[in-house]
Amino acid sequence: MKVLFNKLKKANKIFLIIYLITFILYLITYILLIKNLMGLSGIETAIRIAVIIIFGIWLIVYFLWNLINLILRKHIKIAITTALTIIFAIIFSFANYYIDILYTGISNITENKYVVYTTNLVVLNGTQITEDSTLGMINNSSDIEGNVLAKELIEKEGLTNNKVVEYSSYYEMIFDLINGELGGIFLSSNYQTIFGSEEAFAALADTKVAYTYSKEMENQDSTLTNNKSLKEPFTILLMGVDSETDGLNANAAFNGDTLMLITFNPSTLNATMFSIPRDTYVPIACNNNRYAKINSSAAYGTSCVIDTVEELTDITIDYYVKINFKGVVDLVDALGGIEVDIEAPDFNYNHGVNCGGRFCEQNSDRDTSAEGMIYLDPGLQTINGEEALAYARCRHLYLQSDIDRNRHQQQVVEAIARKAANLDNLTKIEEILNAVTKNITTNMSSEQILSFYEVLKSMISSSLSDGSFITIEKTYLEYYSLPVRLSNNGIFTSAIGYYPDSLNAIIQLMKENLELEPHEMIRTFSFDANEEYTTKVTGQGITTGERLETMPSFIGSSVSEAQTWATNHNITLYTEFADETSPYYNPNIAPGLIANQSVSDGILLNNVSELTIYINNTSTTGEPPTPNEDSGGNDANDEEQVPENGGTEEDPDNENDDPLDVILPSDDENQNQGSNSESSESNNSHNQNENQSETE
């Protein structure tokens, strides 16, 4: 060893220094490369090991060979090998940089173990919380922001002497605040985002936060943990957050306006997409299966949405992805735009703006000025991020409103997937990762996300070999209008019901793709040369199966009519007589006819087991007179003045009741037109539908 050092002392000092610096540089970058490559589990294992071995051998060769060259003064060989080694070190540095970006991005979109939860005590503008204020809170002890933190805020702010009323529904609680029956209510910090899209809650714009309270806690939201390999069929629930700000608070309650259940079979590269309309009336899993619009489940958190969708579809959700749709702007721009076939609008006006036959929608900042609106001509074209978000958001220009919007969102998702699979510019990776990571969260582990590489490789291989991509089978849930009264004598909300057989067809398709059910081969095919061929959309055109039914109005009807209905629906009917001194008496109803009823019209029937009807009685004998079926105002379909606790189908405004007791339109008044327009007629009499359900 002493002889070796003596010889090195005689070597050229410049080449010796270059040799040592190069060796150290290479060693450091090589060690980092080993660490990063080993972290890419499941991605080209053989190649990763081969790279580590080959460049490890080069490290040994460079060290020993150039040591000899230094002693032998073969400076040209040292220069050549050093140049190569420096190039390798530079390549390692770039590789380490991009792998670090990938790791950082993936870690940002995986679930956080600890979360800052916030509750706000919300009051109407111009009001204050006093000792006499009645407060409203959710009675579900698993609701962190609506119940747990609300109780802690009460203690912290010394509000223990205030009366507290507990609610099972956010909707009813908010309406009681708006009506002045409550002094304040406890809501999530982003309550405007969650409930602001409902026309019924427009008054929330005139509220303020009286008190706020935050606490860092272990993530109570999603309980989904899954070690399922992405080499076998899996499901993903895509939940869209339509936020006005860039970035995503991954663990906050959200508006839930976009729900898309996706199944994917990696062996066949076949996917199914099922967009669930936001107004679909279903049992909410975390709220004792009380019926409500499915988007309301998002107010209780991600877990509630997942459980509700699983109960609706009887399909286990393996993974979820929550995405802030404003992040679509950055993502699409980073991809260089996407190609989408823009559907021609059915209407000309959107947000009060005349679109002139073109597509138009607010920009990402919801600006309706001339500069803020996005305009597009119908047809196939490449659109940028702002245009993609506008198309994915828009519902007011189209006949079927949210249904059409769901279909457009599927187009955008598919276009993004196609563009990402054909991405060949590595410089775009950082832009894409930045756009994605701050606007997406998921329950997938880093290893599971990385394993998507194999799926992506299969897609690219298929695309290069025969020009094909993944096969995406779209679905369509047939629906009907379902105005529902939220509580007895309360207001109506414009929900939609679905046809069970349409849903069953979609579920069957998804289960076949997941290989849970055998796929039935279609052995017959027919076509008409005079008709344009269209691709089959599963679920479309199927309008069979038992529908939900609401309580009809019997005011002005005969007792026998109510008795027949009650018998057919297995509901126990009670009768009481109401004279002029009774609060149920109606002077505009002929004697002997029904003046009022204990369950208001519009209430879902799923939990209704009995009904009391009140019969107008002006007789002093205690017996009702024989009704005159031909007398004026006796027909159930005539318009009549209604007492405070009832309303007719013809007078939904019920002016004697709460001023908010009206049928509120859905997000688009045109939602109930088109192929489902006939269903709206079914809500106009006590023969309304074949439906069941309950108040929210």
Image: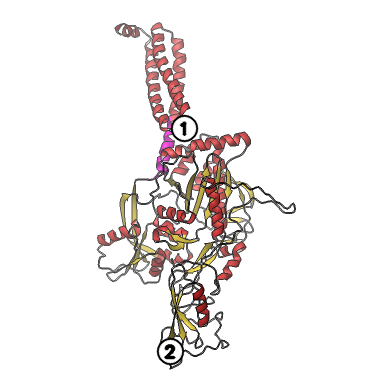
Q: Residue furthest right?
A: 530
Please report the bounds of the magenta region as a residue range.
96-111
Q: How far from the left and from the top, in percent, is residue 645?
A: 44, 78
Taking the image as shown, residue 490 lies to the left or right of residue 473, namely: left
Image quarter of residue 48: top left
Dot 1: element: loop
Q: State yes or no: residue 110 in magenta.
A: yes
Q: Is residue 424 covered in magenta?
A: no
Does 360 sit above or below residue 95?
A: below
Principal secondary structure, stretch drawn in magenta: helix
Q: Is residue 336 among what the camera can see?
A: no
Query: How many angstroms separate mark 1 from mark 2 (CA)?
Result: 82 Å
Task: Using the image as rendered, state which of residue 43 and residue 390 is in the foreground.
Answer: 43
Q: How is the image coloured?
A: secondary structure
Q: Nearer the viewer, residue 672 or 116?
A: 672
Q: How many marks?
A: 2
Q: Quadrant of the C terminus?
A: bottom left
Q: In the rendered view, would you say 25 is above or below 370?
A: above
Q: Which mark is residue 464?
A: none
Q: Amino acid at mark 1?
A: Ile
Q: Are marks 1 and 2 in contact (CB under 8 Å)?
A: no
Using the image, tell me which numbered label, if any, was put on residue 580: 2
Q: Which of disc 2 and disc 1 is earlier in sequence? A: 1
Query: Closest to the observer: 469 or 119?
Result: 469
Disc 2 residue type (three-letter): Glu
Q: From the image, tell me which residue sits under label 1.
A: 43
